[in-house]
Image (cartoon, helix red, strand yellow):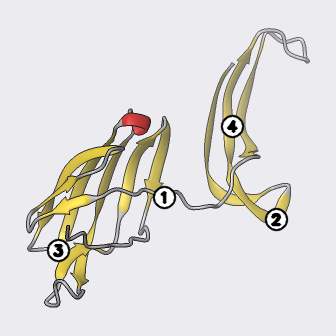
């Protein structure tokens, strides 16, 4: 068998109340088939991943940040990035460590102003995030992800 599944979140064809990973299956099957032919070709067969769902994935890491640079400071992830102060954007390359080894992500997004009791004049931190890469061998693409920022002062 040589099959490829291409899909994305969508309505489950068997139950319109569920969101699954839905897509198409294409490729070829070699060897004896029920029709007696030595091989069969499959093109665009609608398929879905039964055990999938619409729960969001979470990426959590501590980031050390200066005015122009970012550094992942986490036991499960490594990486560094740059801040463009003219456009208030950032790029951050992330690689998995320990249990995430082999995973890679390219993160980009916009910076915004935050304030708190420690820095009442504010500080810039990510407010949007787009992600592209691989996690545990699976392609990952995320746009306009939700971000929560906390300032570590100790």
Q: Position of residue 10 (x, y in %)?
A: 68, 60
Task: Determine the image quadrant of residue 89.
Answer: bottom left
Is 25 drawn above or below residue 36 in the view shown? below
Quadrant where the N terminus sits is top right
Taking the image as shown, residue 77 lies to the left or right of residue 29, namely left
**Residue at 42%, 39% in the rendered image:** 100
Identify the secondary structure beneath mark 1: loop
Residue drawn 44% across the image and 36% down it: 99
The residue tagged 4 is 25
* Residue at mark 3 to residue at mark 4: CA–CA distance: 42 Å
Q: Which mark is residue 88?
A: 3
Label 1 with label 2: CB-CB less than 8 Å: no
Query: Crowding at label 1, few (<14), some or many (≥20) Cα neighbours within 10 Å?
Result: few
Which residue lies under the disc numbered 2?
A: 16
Sequence-first disc among 3 and 4: 4
Q: Residues within 10 Å of mark 4 (few under 14, many from 20)?
A: some
Q: Earlier in the sequence, mark 3 or mark 2?
A: 2
Label of residue 58 in the image: 1
Q: CA distance from mark 3 to mark 2?
A: 41 Å
């Amino acid at each position: 068998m040589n099959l490829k599944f291409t899909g994305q979140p969508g309505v489950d064809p068997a139950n319109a109340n569920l969101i699954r990973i839905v897509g198409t299956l294409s490729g070829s099957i070699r060897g004896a088939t029920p029709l007696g032919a030595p091989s069969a070709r499959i093109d665009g067969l609608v398929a879905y991943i039964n055990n999938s769902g619409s729960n969001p994935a979470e990426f959590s890491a501590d980031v050390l940040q200066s005015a122009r640079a970012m550094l992942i400071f986490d036991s499960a992830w490594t990486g560094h990035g740059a801040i463009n102060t003219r456009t208030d954007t950032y790029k951050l390359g992330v690689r998995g460590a320990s249990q995430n080894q082999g995973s890679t992500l390219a993160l980009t997004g916009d910076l915004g102003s935050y304030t708190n009791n420690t820095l009442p004049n504010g500080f810039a931190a990510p407010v949007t995030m787009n992600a592209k890469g691989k996690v545990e061998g699976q392609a990952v693409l995320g746009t306009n992800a939700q971000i929560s920022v906390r300032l570590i002062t100790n």
